[in-house]
């Protein structure tokens, strides 16, 4: 009887995506499911989501059974993206920790795949005219976070990435 209860839970743990769905993989950002294929690897049959990340010219194969554990998820809802935009309007919080520690924290937030966390990085590293220049590594992290957030915003709102970047920049400029 306990086996009957475990089976539906296991089925619920697996994410159901179809060809053409936009998905977010935490460390790579927004991609599109281009295929769901069955492969035999080391004698085991494995179903795989084949995800294309066009901006990086990369294909990723994620086992269907491990999709949830790997952090693969659907695009954020409009409400979550609105929360991310509200986060951009907030006051930046720059910790007094050494740069290498802050950089690790920023990278972790970007790789979490959470739009609100990514918006925090963009907000905290954004520089307006009249503010001191950023170091090269600060700029790299800022641009990576802005790019990741813009790609998801573009996919959610069905606009191109450039328009999404403009929207994010206009929100950041209004705060200044």
Image: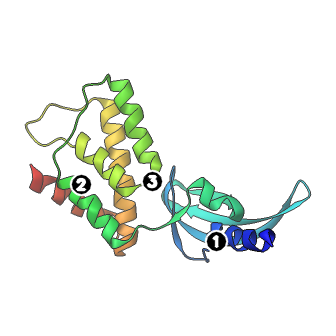
Badge 2 crowding class, 10 Å Cα cut-off, few under 14, some 14 to 19, many 20 or more, is many
Please report the residue visible at 35 percent of the width from the left and 50 percent of the height from the top.
Answer: 118
Mark 2 or 1 closer to N-term? 1
51 w.r.t. 19: above or below:
above
Residue under label 3, please give it: 113
Q: Secondary structure at mark 3?
A: loop
Q: Quadrant of residue 68?
A: bottom right
Please report the residue visible at 28 percent of the width from the left and 29 percent of the height from the top.
Answer: 135
Specify whether 15 is left or right of 44.
left
* Front-most of residues 160 and 78: 78
Specify whether 165 is left or right of 152.
left
- Residue at mark 3 to residue at mark 1: CA–CA distance: 22 Å
Residue under label 2, please give it: 87
Where's residue 19, x and y in %? 61, 77
Closer mark to the observer between disc 2 and disc 1: 1
47 w.r.t. 103: above or below:
below
Whether residue 108 is visible, yes or no, is yes
Viewport quadrant of the N terminus: bottom right
* Front-most of residues 27 and 83: 83
User: Residue 12 has which mark?
Assistant: 1
- Residue at mark 2 to residue at mark 1: CA–CA distance: 32 Å
Mark 3 or 1 closer to N-term? 1
Q: Quadrant of residue 140?
A: top left
Where's residue 151, x and y in %? 39, 61
Closer mark to the observer between disc 3 and disc 1: 1
- Residue at mark 2 to residue at mark 3: CA–CA distance: 15 Å
Q: Secondary structure at mark 1?
A: helix
138 w.r.t. 166: above or below:
above
Whether residue 159 is visible, yes or no, is no
């Amino acid at each position: 009887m306990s086996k009957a209860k475990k089976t539906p839970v296991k089925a619920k743990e697996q994410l159901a995506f179809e060809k053409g769905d936009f998905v977010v993989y935490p460390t790579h950002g927004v991609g599109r499911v281009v295929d769901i294929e069955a492969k035999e690897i080391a004698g085991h049959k494995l179903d795989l989501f084949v995800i294309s990340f066009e901006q990086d010219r990369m294909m990723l194969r994620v086992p269907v059974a491990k999709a949830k554990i790997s952090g693969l998820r659907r695009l954020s809802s409009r409400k979550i993206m609105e929360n991310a935009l509200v986060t951009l309007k907030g006051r930046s919080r720059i910790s007094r920790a050494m740069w290498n520690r802050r950089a690790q924290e920023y990278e972790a937030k970007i790789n979490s795949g959470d739009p609100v966390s990514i918006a925090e990085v963009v907000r905290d590293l954004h520089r307006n005219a009249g503010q001191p220049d950023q170091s090269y590594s600060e700029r790299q992290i800022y641009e990576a976070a802005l790019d990741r957030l813009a790609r998801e915003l573009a996919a959610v709102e069905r606009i191109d990435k450039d328009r999404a970047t403009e929207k994010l920049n206009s929100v950041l400029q209004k705060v200044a």
